[in-house]
């Protein structure tokens, strides 16, 4: 699905701002049939939960309603008119005046609704959006609604970040021509100094398609006509980690001499490949440094914010990070565009987090009932997961920054049924995108002895907390565990291995000369221990610390004002570990990880 972009043939109106807001329990039965009877207003884009002081709103189970008036530009009478929601977490029903015009399930992928037949150019309409943050065992991510002793419904979930809900990304009204470009796919490669861009274009009706590729200075370097083909670029400049270079592909649908639709796509020419135990970008071994992140900030929750985005990328660059994982859901498209432009490498993860009943069993990893069963991850869950993968890959397939899909975070890959659940999903992902490697982030209790999934995937991504949840405060023992664990995976798989999570909760300002959990020194020493071990294995292809910044979680006695494993605080102040990572990742001290000794 193409991101709405202004072009000579397309226009858009941004609908962000302050909307009328109400929760279902306080509204009349059909809130969309008139002006919402509510004293509340909520900002968009932002999760609604922390905007109010009211606990009933923060922890609301059920639907909330957003409403505003929208005026259709008067010049749009010949156009198709669409509403675009960059995200509605986790489900939405959309009403134009009194009518339901569409629904969407899945909180982190966009959707378009064609409302051409319901609105008129120049006129205003009432837009009402019902959004639900509810999670069940058949949603991605999964959850469960429990009813308490007082009859209150409560959302329970099996992931470690606050279940923020609402309109956390932008909303648009946009125009698309009657005959339009509906999708564009590019696959890039190079041979010596010649690059290639294989493209294919889908249009809403048969029409002539032509494409032209311009370099960063705007010079046209290749042209072609036809809905699919291969463009060749002499003296290609590759998109590289840390050295982004983008061409612009202009796709046009033409009728005789008239351009009926035009759409621009940024294209980075690069290849990605897994070979033996190496992860290759442009044929060269790549070593990931960086973080698992969250879309999370005070007040706006998961609301996208350009200023936070710019600052987060600045901090990543400052620490020497070359990559991050979109843990644990697809991030706003603006984030991927930014990564494309700045040469930051992305592991793009689905929202499939919590497919693991073992987490309920705590450190024993013993599920109260099987994860892959009618009770929990069943056929409907799998169908929702499949649909989510479709929407993710359709949205993000053209981003050069995205080098790998992560299909799930910490699924119960040690349990029976995992293979049957995941095999069709892996097949689907490979069919949708045969070019990128696949991975899943491996939970601690899925070991090289009991994991049932790794053969389906290309890269071993380990989430490991030796020295934190296991061998707490005992880095010597932790080091032995970690060493044995990595060695076991190498022996079993021969695939590239990386650490997608390792971290220690840290309260800034807490200090100790001992190996004392929660202190800034312990976080530094914990990371140093991990790095010592990683550096012993040439098969190791990367390290992404958990987490970039502290973030909000649900209540729990093991969480103090959220998860504190951030290298930065929630308001992005560095803890001591940030300086330690900067030294390692920028090579200020010794050699940068992943660089052969003779390059130092
Ligand atoms: C891992 C999860 C991550 C948690 C982290 C932690 O993947 O979402 O936040 O543990 O416990 O299991 O900090």
Image (spheres, rainbow, N blue to C red):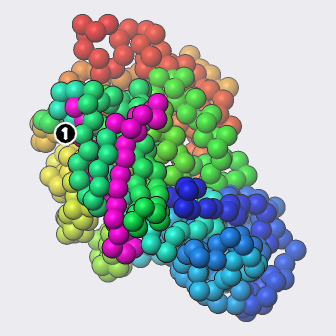
- Within the magenta stretch, is there residue 476? no
Visible residue check, residue 206: yes
Q: Quadrant of the N terminus?
A: bottom left
Q: Position of residue 594 (x, y in %)?
A: 29, 21
Could you tell whether 585 is left or right of 198 in the image?
right
- Observer-nearest of 189 and 587: 189
Examine the rendered structure and indicate whether residue 79 appears above or below residue 31.
Answer: above
Which residues are drawn in magenta?
A: 194-221
Q: Dot 1, how many residues are within 10 Å of its Cα: few (below 14), some (14-19), or many (20+)?
A: some
The secondary element bearing badge 1 is classed as strand
Name the residue at 72% across, 72% down: 74
Name the residue at 18% across, 27% down: 192
- Observer-nearest of 166 and 67: 67
Could you tell whether 281 is left or right of 548 in the image?
left
- Outermost residue on the front side: it is 257
Name the residue at 47% across, 30% down: 217
- Within the magenta stretch, is there residue 216? yes
């Amino acid at each position: 699905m193409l991101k709405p972009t202004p072009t000579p043939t397309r226009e858009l109106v941004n609908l962000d701002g302050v909307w009328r807001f109400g929760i279902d329990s306080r509204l009349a039965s059909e809130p969309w049939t008139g002006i919402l009877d509510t004293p509340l207003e909520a900002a968009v884009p932002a999760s609604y939960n922390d905007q109010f002081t009211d606990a009933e709103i923060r922890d609301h189970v059920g639907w909330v309603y957003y409403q505003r008036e929208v005026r259709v530009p008067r010049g749009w009478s010949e156009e198709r008119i669409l509403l675009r929601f960059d995200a509605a977490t986790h489900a939405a029903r959309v009403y134009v005046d009194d009518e339901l015009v569409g629904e969407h399930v899945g909180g982190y992928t966009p959707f378009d609704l064609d409302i051409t037949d319901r609105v008129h150019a120049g006129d205003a309409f009432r837009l009402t959006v019902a959004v639900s943050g509810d999670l069940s065992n058949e949603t991605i991510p999964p959850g469960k609604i429990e009813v308490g002793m007082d009859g209150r419904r409560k959302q329970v979930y099996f992931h470690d970040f606050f279940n923020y809900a609402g309109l956390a990304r932008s909303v648009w009204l946009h125009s698309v021509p009657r005959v339009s470009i509906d999708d564009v796919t590019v696959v890039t490669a190079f041979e010596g100094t010649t690059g290639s861009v294989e493209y294919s274009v889908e249009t809403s009706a048969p029409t002539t398609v032509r494409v032209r590729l311009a370099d960063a200075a705007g010079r046209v370097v290749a042209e072609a006509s036809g809905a699919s083909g291969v463009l060749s670029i002499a003296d290609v400049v590759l998109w590289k980690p840390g050295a982004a270079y983008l061409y612009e592909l202009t796709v046009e649908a033409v009728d005789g001499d008239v351009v009926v639709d035009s759409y621009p796509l940024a294209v980075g020419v690069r290849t990605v490949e897994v070979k033996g135990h190496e992860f290759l970008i442009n044929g060269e071994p790549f070593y990931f440094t960086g973080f698992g992140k969250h879309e999370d900030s005070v007040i706006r929750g998961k609301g996208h914010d350009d200023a936070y985005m710019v600052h987060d990328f600045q901090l990543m660059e400052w620490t020497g990070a070359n990559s991050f994982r979109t843990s644990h859901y697809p991030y706003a498209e603006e984030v991927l565009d930014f990564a494309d432009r700045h040469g930051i490498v992305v592991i793009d993860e689905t929202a499939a987090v919590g497919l693991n009943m073992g987490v309920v069993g705590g450190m024993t990893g013993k599920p109260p009932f099987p994860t892959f069963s009618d009770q929990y991850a069943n056929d409907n869950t799998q169908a929702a997961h499949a649909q989510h993968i479709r929407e993710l890959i359709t949205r993000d397939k053209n981003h050069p920054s995205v080098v790998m899909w992560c299909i799930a975070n910490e699924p119960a890959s040690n349990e029976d049924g995992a293979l049957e659940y995941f095999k069709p999903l892996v097949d689907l992902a490979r069919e949708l995108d045969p070019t990128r490697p696949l991975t899943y982030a491996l939970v601690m209790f899925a070991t090289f002895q009991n994991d049932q999934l790794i053969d389906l995937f290309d890269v071993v991504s380990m989430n490991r907390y030796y020295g934190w949840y296991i061998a707490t405060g005992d880095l010597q023992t932790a080091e032995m565990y970690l060493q044995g664990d990595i060695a076991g995976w190498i022996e079993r798989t021969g695939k590239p291995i990386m650490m997608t999570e390792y971290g220690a909760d840290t309260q800034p300002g807490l200090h100790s000369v001992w190996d004392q959990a929660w202190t800034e020194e312990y976080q530094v020493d914990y990371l140093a221990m991990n790095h010592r071990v990683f550096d012993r294995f040439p098969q190791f292809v990367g390290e992404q610390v958990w987490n970039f910044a502290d973030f909000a979680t649900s209540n729990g006695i093991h969480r103090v004002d959220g998860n504190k494993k951030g290298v930065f605080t929630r308001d992005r102040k560095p803890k001591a570990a940030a300086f330690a990572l900067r030294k390692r990742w920028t090579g200020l001290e010794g050699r940068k990880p992943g660089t052969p000794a003779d390059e130092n």
